[in-house]
Each structure stands twice: as structure tokens, then as C-alpha cells.
Image (cartoon, rainbow, N blue to C red):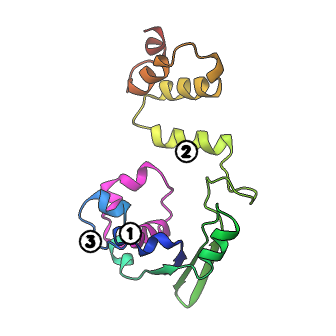
């Protein structure tokens, strides 16, 4: 697997290949590439120790290389939101290529790069699942979408802290 990405890959912190703790993986472009190749969606799953230290992921790290995208500076100068990336994966006699100029979730002139409200809500629900009580997740989403109606932001904060508790009891306090 070969990647051409933005200039940050030249910083030593991103070049780490010694993954001993979950936070080591967070700052390793090689681990991120290998992890992404396994189709793990961005979110809390990227912190799961079983996945982070999966032997298959660790082996794939050794088969990754990366460098700065050759057009990085020119594209960045022409559009400040530009973060060009190209990935090539070669396996079993085939090569797959993916390329993007703007990362998902970032505002840009490219339609579809910003996240829709539905995508933002789905991302929140995924990351909150198992961390915040399901009823509280629903209540938080409802209140955030109607934030102008929320009279006391402490209500939102209580909902984030009530794992397993009923959302109604959190609202009542």
C-alpha cells in the first residue's frame, strides 16, 4: 500500500511504527493506513485495543509506504482547504486507487466533503453507543437539533454523564 498525502507526514511524530499503546497508533500514518485498509469506520473503534493491536493490522503496517503528495503545496496554495491524498493498494495481481482532494468532514468547494446533519448524527450515535445510555443519546440529539429551545445547558451536560440512567430523570434535575 502506498499513500501520497499532505506534508504533515514529514513530522517525526507521524512516522512512528512502534505501536505499544493506543495513543501510538493515533499518531502513526502507517498504522492509520493499515487500519483503514481493514475498513474500520472512523470513530471510537479506532481506540479498541483488540483492533489496534490486531496482528493482521500490525503486519500490514510493514507493507505501507507514504510520502508527500507531489501537488500538495500547489493545491494548498490554490485552495486553503485542500488536503490531497492518493492511495494505491496492490494485492493479488490487482491495484486499487482512491484519490481525494478534500477530507470528508471539512468544508470545501467540493460538493459532498462537508458532513450532512444525518452523517453528523450517525457519527455521534456511533461514538456514544455503549458510552451514554441509549435514551440519553436520543434526548441529546433532540436537544442539540433544537438548541435554541434549551433553557439550561446543564441539561445537556447531565445527559452526557448519565450512562445507563433514564434520560427523563436527567432532564428532571
In the image, 11 versus 85, the foreground residue is 11
Quadrant holding the C terminus? top left
Q: Which residues are magenta?
A: 28-56
Between circles 2 and 3, the one closer to the viewer is 3
Residue lying furthest top in this view? 172
Residue lying furthest front in this view? 77
In the image, 38 versus 17, the foreground residue is 17
Q: Main secondary structure of the magenta part?
A: helix
Between circles 1 and 2, the one closer to the viewer is 1
Numbered disc 1: secondary structure? helix
Numbered disc 3: secondary structure? loop
Numbered disc 2: secondary structure? helix
Q: Is residue 65 above or below residue 111?
A: below
Q: Is residue 140 above or below residue 113?
A: above
Q: Position of residue 85 (x, y in %)?
A: 59, 72
Which residue is disc 2 drawn over?
123
Report the Cα–Cα distance between label 2 and label 3: 29 Å
Q: Quadrant of residue 82?
A: bottom right
Q: Residue at x 60, y 75 (%)?
A: 73
Q: Cβ–Cβ below 8 Å for labels 3 and 1?
A: no
Between circles 3 and 1, the one closer to the viewer is 1
Report the Cα–Cα distance between label 1 and label 2: 25 Å
Q: Position of residue 11 (x, y in %)?
A: 39, 71
Which residue is disc 1 drawn over?
14
Q: Residue at x 75, y 58 (%)?
A: 109
Number of other residues with Cα within 10 Å of mark 3, as a class: few under 14, some 14 to 19, many 20 or more? few
Can residue 100 be seen here? The reply is no
Number of other residues with Cα within 10 Å of mark 1, as a class: few under 14, some 14 to 19, many 20 or more? some
Q: Position of residue 80 (x, y in %)?
A: 65, 62
Amino acid at each position: 500500500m502506498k499513500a501520497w498525502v499532505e506534508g504533515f507526514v514529514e513530522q517525526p511524530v507521524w512516522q512512528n511504527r512502534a505501536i505499544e499503546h493506543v495513543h501510538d497508533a493515533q499518531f502513526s500514518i502507517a498504522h492509520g493506513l493499515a487500519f483503514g485498509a481493514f475498513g474500520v469506520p472512523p470513530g471510537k473503534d479506532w481506540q479498541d485495543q483488540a483492533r489496534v493491536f490486531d496482528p493482521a493490522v500490525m503486519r500490514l503496517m510493514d507493507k505501507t509506504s507514504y510520502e508527500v503528495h507531489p501537488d500538495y503545496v500547489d493545491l494548498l496554495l490554490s485552495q486553503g482547504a485542500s488536503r490531497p491524498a492518493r492511495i494505491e493498494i496492490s494485492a493479488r495481481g490487482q491495484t486499487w486507487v482512491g484519490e481525494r482532494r478534500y477530507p470528508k468532514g471539512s468544508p470545501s468547494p467540493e460538493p459532498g466533503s462537508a458532513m450532512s446533519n444525518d452523517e453528523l448524527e450517525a457519527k455521534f450515535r456511533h461514538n456514544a453507543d455503549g458510552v451514554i445510555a441509549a435514551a440519553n443519546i436520543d434526548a441529546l440529539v433532540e436537544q442539540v437539533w433544537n438548541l435554541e429551545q434549551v433553557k439550561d445547558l446543564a441539561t445537556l451536560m447531565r445527559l452526557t454523564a448519565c450512562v445507563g440512567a433514564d434520560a427523563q430523570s436527567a432532564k428532571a434535575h
